[in-house]
Amino acid sequence: MFRKEESMDKPKEITVLVADDSSVTRKIVSDLLVESNINVVGEAINGIEVLEMIDELNPDVVVLDIWMPQKNGLEVLQDIFNRRQAAGKTAKNIPRTIVLSCLIDSDEDIALRCLRLGAVTCIAKPKEGILHTESFSQNLLRAVKEAYAARPRFYKMPLEIKPEKNQSKSDSSGKESTDRTENRPLLIAIGSSTGGPQIVEGLIAKLPASFKIPLVVIQHLPKGFTRRFAERLDRICEIKVSEAKNGDMIEPQNVYIAPGGTNIAVNGKNIYIDGSDNFHIKPSIDCFFTAAAGQFKDKFTGIILSGMGGDAVLGAEALKENGGRLIVQDPDTCMIDGMVKDLIEKKLADEILPPERILERLLELGA
């Protein structure tokens, strides 16, 4: 059954389809969006309606519940994902998706599955079903605007990574091997936001257990999600992956995932929790990169992936001031390119590479 809203007014900039089997939730979410001059073009009560209304209404963004009849939210995401993969770079009229569900808080694995299927972000419904809160309204509006800015596609890492052409080989004196060791960074950190988890997974999954450089990942994810993210990566990767804890010593052959909702920094070779309020995003790329740059100087390499702006510039500036090296993801391969474009425009990037070339660089550095 359609819940389509007809209007003779000129469509507003952002068009949204709200999908939830609860009429109360649909009304509250729709009212919040309309009050912010966002055009709610329709409402769906089950997964089949969602797919039908996507075809008919062509919304920019879908706000999608997980627990719905006939087709659940995961099945809808899978269908949208399949359409996007089939269309490739020519993908058009494929909406960006925000998952809004009570399951997000209770089952972090669900949230990670949604992100892997191309959801721009996941928002937990407030407990007790109370949606009339300032924080929820702000989170929802920010998510819709972020989703609208996202590219409606999913970057797929090539299955095989070919060595870079003209890559130098060691001569009998072992000079190249010595140079590589001398130039090898002592720490690599990856900063990532919306659209980044699948790229992070694709990179780390291909690192060997013998990778010689400690790697810290600052991924913008809520508290709880990062623990499950680290556990999943540890299951599928050769290299050891764990959620970072206060006092952890950073060691080669290890990947540390910054805990959600918390800022971390580094002192010497130890990770510590930064309890200051200097950085509003938690975990903050700026916070960790600034501390690491001060500690490791020119032996620190940073990598910035997909995401909105607002984080990473201060950390990148500190990295460059201390002689470190910065690699950023090619904007054309990002789900959202605001974060990397900020760095490119400020001429902070040493290299601008697609994910498969970033992986090549990681493998070269850690060999």
Image (cartoon, grey):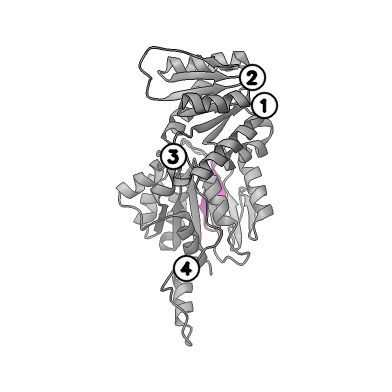
Q: Nearer the viewer, residue 141 or 161?
A: 161
Circles 2 and 4: CB distance less than 8 Å?
no
Q: Position of residue 107 (x, y in %)?
A: 68, 34
Separation (CA) of disc 2 from disc 3: 27 Å
Q: Which mark is residue 21?
A: 2
Q: Report the span colored magenta.
A: 264-274
Q: Which mark is residue 151?
A: 3
Judge whether residue 313 can be spotted in this image.
Answer: yes
Q: Position of residue 326 (x, y in %)?
A: 40, 56
Which residue position holds label 1? 67
Separation (CA) of disc 2 from disc 4: 54 Å
Q: Nearer the viewer, residue 173 or 164?
A: 164
Residue at figure coordinates x 49%, y 38% from the top left: 276
Q: Secondary structure at mark 1?
A: loop
The part of the image, by quadrant, that contains residue 128 is: top right
Which residue position holds label 4? 184
Separation (CA) of disc 1 from disc 3: 26 Å
Q: Quadrant of the N terminus?
A: top right
Q: Closer to the camera: disc 2 or disc 4? A: 2
Mark 3 or mark 1, which is nearer the start of the sequence?
A: 1
Mark 3 or mark 2, which is nearer the start of the sequence?
A: 2
